[in-house]
Image (tube, rainbow, N blue to C red):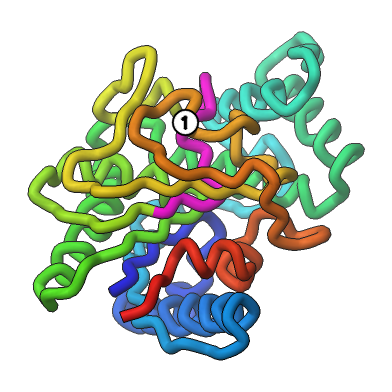
Amino acid sequence: MIVGVHGIWNYGYYRSSRDATVATAAISADWTTWLREGLAAARGKADDPPVRVAYYAHHLHRGTAQGADVTQLDEDAQGLLVNWVELLRDAPVIAQGTRTIRARAAVDWLTAHYGETARRFAMIFAREVSSYLKTPNSRRRLAARDAVAETIRSAARQGEAVTVVAHSLGSVVVYEALWAHPDLRVNRLVTLGSPLGMPGVVFDRLDPAPGQRGSRPPGVSEWVNLADIGDLVAVPRTGLSDVFDGVVSENPALTIAKWDFHTVRSYLSCADVAEATWTGR
């Protein structure tokens, strides 16, 4: 059984129905389709992997404006954005001034180097990561964590080995969920495009605090981390094994798509990722 844990930009599954069960079914169907495409590319035939995605996007949504202007980000999200972009640059030279001025300079740099889509992505990334990490033990944070833990627990009750595939922010949520619920047993944890090791943005704000190095969560037998070589969220670029003990496999030369280097669709439909995710029944 595969349990998926989604990343940012997935509130749309909930928006139309306002029903988490409907959203879960829809996103699980999409993940199944994309993973089937990856397995077909890897093996020449399409397996039918059982995928259930732990849906938590509705717990993080604040009901605030979703535009591409940094003034729509709160101070924490603006600071997160600046710190993230500074990590992507060769040197931290974001313009001085108020936090908003520095945040605007950060998104301008992203736009100049990666295009207009990067600006929209940066706003969503900063907003949703901040929504989750801003306050320790917040209602939002605990609700997201508990939703992931319950989905893993439900899959385990079926008596099959559980593989957890966590994308982007989802890797942060599942990392904390597995530490908060050490009774959970996961055969393989696969993190995709993970920001877990991002200093000053994610790593230092994890619960439990990792200190100088983090470690594989209890109950996880194997941890595989995969990231496209151009994924802007997967910082440090050298992989999670630099800052976490227990990461047993990484592929530093992975390329999932020519232009689309972060979406879960591109990850799951990539042959190398699909092979690492689903070994068959």
Q: Position of residue 196 (x, y in %)?
A: 46, 35
Q: Is residue 280 above or below residue 117?
A: below
Q: Which quarter of the figure has residue 217? A: top left
Q: Name the one closer to the observer, 191 or 47.
A: 47
Locate residue 222, reporting x and y percent: 31, 48
Q: Position of residue 61 (x, y in %)?
A: 43, 55
Above or below residue 13? Residue 267 is above
> Image check: 93 left or right of 149?
right
In the rendered image, residue 50, in percent from the top left (x then y), is placed at: 34, 82
Residue 87 placement: quadrant: top right
* Count of marks, rendered view: 1
Whether the magenta-drawn stretch holds residue 6 is answered as no
Residue for point 35% across, 53% down: 189
Label 1 packing within 10 angstroms: few (<14), some (14-19), many (20+): many
In percent of the image, x 34 and y 34: which residue is there?
246
Name the quadrant of the C terminus: bottom left
Find disc 1 in the rendering and name its residue: 241
The structure residue drawn at horizontal position 39% and vertical position 52%, both measured from the top left corner, is 60
Q: Residue at x 52, y 55 (%)?
A: 8
Please report the bounds of the magenta region as a residue range. 190-202
Q: Amino acid at mark 1?
A: Ser
